[in-house]
Every structure is written in C-alpha cells, then in structure tokens.
Amino acid sequence: MSRPAVGTAAFHRRDGALFCEDIPLAAVAERFGTPTYVYSRRAIVDAFGAYAAALAGRRALVCYAMKANSNLAVLDLLARVGAGFDIVSGGELARALAAGGDPRKIVFSGVGKTEDEIRAALRAGIRCFNLESAPELDRIQQVAAALGMQAPVSVRTNPDVDPKTHPYITTGLRQNKFGVAYAQTLALYRQAARLPNIRIVGIDCHIGSQITEVAPYVDAAAKLLDLVDALSREGIALEHIDFGGGLGIAYRDETPPAPGALIAAILAQVDARGHGDKEIVFEPGRSLVGAAGALLTRVNIVKAGTEKNFAIVDAAMNDLLRPALYDAWMQVQPVQAGTGATQRYDIVGPVCESGDWLARDRDLALAAGDLLAVLGAGAYGMSMASNYNTRGRPAEVMIDGDRIYEVRRRESVEALFAGESTLP
Ligand code: LLP
C-alpha cells in the first residue's frame, strides 16, 4: 500500500508520514485546508531537465502543453528553465504571456481558432500556428493580410497511427477531428506556399496522450519525415519538425519510456534521413507535471454499505475529473499511517452523481478526518476542474524544499456567482 509514489521522489514517506519535498502534507492541510493541489517545484524542473538533456547540443525547443496545468507559477517555472508553450486558446496565450513566456517560443494548436485568437497571437509574435484545416489557412491569411503581417505556419498532419491509448485521448487516427489528413497535407502546403501573408516554418503531429510505447512515435516520425522529403523536393524548406507530446507517466504499473529513450529513437531517424539541421520541437504536457502533483483531500464520512464501503472525501469529480471521465486509475495514499483495520473502500466525493468517484476498491485503513493524497494529479487535474454543484475549486500550492507557496487561493463561493444577476 505504501508503495513509492508514481514516477518521482517528490512525494515520499518519512517516519510513516507523506511528504512533498521537505514539507509534510499534513502541514499543508493544516495551513491551507482541503482539497488542495500540491506541486513539487523540483519534480517539474527535473522532468523538464530530462527533455533538455536528451536534446542537448541540438537546435531544439520544448513547448510545454499548458492545458495539462496552466497555473501561472507552473508556467513561470518552466519559462525560466527555457520552455516554450503549446497553447490551444486565446486564454492560454494570455496566461503564457502573463507568466513571462517568450512569444517566439509559442506554438498555437487547436482545430477551432477564432479570428480574435489569431489576431492576438499574430500581434504577440508567436512562433507559429499549427494549422489543422484548409479553412483555417484561409482565415489566418485574411487576418494576417488585414494586419499587414506574415503569419508563420506549420501543418499538423494526421499520420494515422494507433498510439494504443484510451479512445478519448487518441488524436492521430483518421477518424479523429485533429490535424490535416495525411494524404491532403502536401496539397495544403502547396496552397499555403502561394498565399502572400503566410510563411511556412514547420510541420507537426500529435498522436495522442498517455502513450507508453516508443513504436507509435517512430511510425509517426517516419511518416512525418516522408513529408519533409516530399516538401523539400518541391522547394518548400522547413525550419522545424514538431513531434508533438503525449508521453505517458506511471499511474499504476505502466512502464513508459523515459523522455531520453523516446527522443533518442526519434533523433536517430531524423539524422538517418538527413534532417539533423532542422530544429526539433516537442509538446509534452503530462510528462512534465503529472508526477509532480497530488490532490490532498480529507475523509469526511466513512459509510459502510451492504455491498461496499465508501470513504466520502471533500474532493470530488469537479476537482479531479480523470477517474469519472476516463475510468482512470489514480493512486491514493494515506497521508499518515492508518490506525484502524484495513478495509476495501470506494473513495468518492459529495457530488450528486454516481460517476463521482476518485478511486475504487482500495484497501486502506481509514477513519473520518484522515487525510488522503491522490498522486499523479499534477496534469489534467486542476486544469479540468469545474464548479459543478457550486463548489469552489481547490487551492494550489507549490513546494520548494522546505517552503510552501500558495500559487492560487481557494475559490470563494461568492466568486462563483459574482458575474451573475437576477432579472429586474
Ligand atoms: N500537443 C497537443 C496538440 C495536444 O493536443 C496535447 C494534449 C499535447 C500536446 C500534450 O499531450 P500530453 O503530453 O499531455 O499527453 N485530459 C486527458 C489528456 C488530454 C490530452 C489532450 N491533448 C487526460 O487527463 O488524460
């Protein structure tokens, strides 16, 4: 039960108590209440370091896919160590800039960019738009022309490879809405090359998320490099090749490759095909922040049922949606060594939905008032949180050695309806 925390030494036990870096999680709960997201600064910086080390000596850019966790402190930390950002909305652009991100290191993905978003990104001077359709190309051309600017673009091709992950987070299959069909990609580049306010800078793909094998990446890379060759034969030279994100983490017993192993496999292909001169871009999200975070929650009521025992905690599906949405297994650990007898529990929240659960069939010794930590919650935790059931979202804290920084205060109930009004 007290197995080591997922993928990182950021969360560990000292004398039976769960710590993040040098801070006991019980102290976090005491000071900030629960539920609270807790992040380790060191774990985030180290995770980025693994990518940076594997790319050392190359022209390369790691654009953090900030949808995984867009807290300003997380963005600031990653910007400071040299990360760029992969954004998918005008809101994310504003966050990246507010956190001090360099616009020249921002790539803008997403299938539904609006004119306003395109304008804002052009004015900010982003590195490129990752184009996902022909109509989007026309729209970017129009907006850029109106501003008298040149828009840098990269086509996100859909290589149609199976990343062997959850169907909701597969993105590079023919039936997915993402990217430009592989067979239509060259034609779109030709069209882009003729437009006066478009400047072609790269190519990219992103095949899915929580990928735990190297093979799908190698397949996608081969297809991407075929396109790079075809483009260069037509006189369309690219500055960069973006292999997307998607590398998984170990929530339970998965064995994803280390970033270094994945990158080495891809770089070997890049070099073998004679494209070592191109800048290499990656867009990791989860693998930079997932293992660096935990959701700290307190057991409110222990309810013994006839079929099942329920530990009703103060965090719910609105705070951490992954179990409800993807049937995701996330590790739950007691913050202090349990005292009572071990029993089998479903860990559920107070929200009025049967789908409101965080973990099922876990053998834990617990009592009302105990603290639990859901590990591997640094990615797609807070960033997917909602206010369902008029619940304010959790506080977020960043641990740095023996210091605790509140990087987002708990949302107050008043704030939840501050923008609403009754009829006159
Ligand atoms: N680039 C693009 C264009 C993406 O769409 C994504 C994620 C990433 C990069 C980063 O992927 P990552 O390295 O984090 O796997 N909410 C789901 C995951 C959705 C991923 C969406 N796209 C989850 O909680 O598992």
Image (cartoon, rainbow, N blue to C red):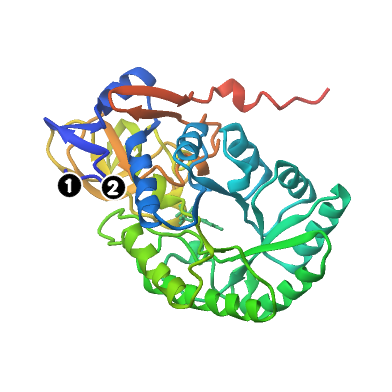
Nearest to the observer: residue 134 or residue 328: 134
Please indicate whether residue 96 sits to the left or right of residue 125 in the image.
left
Amino acid at the residue labelled 1: Arg
Residue occupying the point 52% across, 29% down: 392
Residue occupying the point 52% across, 33% down: 72
Residue occupying the point 77% across, 61% down: 198
Nearest to the observer: residue 128 or residue 334: 128
Please indicate whether residue 286 sits to the left or right of residue 244 in the image.
left
Q: CA distance from mark 2 to mark 1?
A: 10 Å
Crowding at dot 2, Cα within 10 Å, few <14 / some 14-19 / many 20+, comes out as many
Number of dots carrying numbers = 2
- Residue 365's place in the image compared with 255, above or below, is above
- Residue 73's place in the image compared with 225, above or below, is above
Crowding at dot 1, Cα within 10 Å, few <14 / some 14-19 / many 20+, comes out as few
Nearest to the observer: residue 381 or residue 226: 226
Amino acid at the residue labelled 2: Gln
Please indicate whether residue 132 sits to the left or right of residue 174 in the image.
right
Numbered badge on residue 331: 2
Nearest to the observer: residue 95 or residue 167: 95
Q: Hey, which quadrant is residue 33 in on the image?
A: top left
Q: Hey, which quadrant is residue 91 in on the image?
A: top right
Which image quadrant: the C terminus? Answer: top right
Numbered badge on residue 104: none
Q: Position of residue 8 (x, y in %)?
A: 27, 45
Q: Which residue is mark 1?
A: 3
Q: Position of residue 398 (x, y in %)?
A: 39, 29
Please indicate whether residue 8 sits to the left or right of residue 122 in the image.
left
Question: Helix, strand or loop at disc 2?
Answer: loop
- Residue 100's place in the image compared with 378, above or below, is above
Disc nearer the start of the sequence (2/1): 1
Quick check: marks 2 and 1 in contact, CB under 8 Å?
Answer: yes
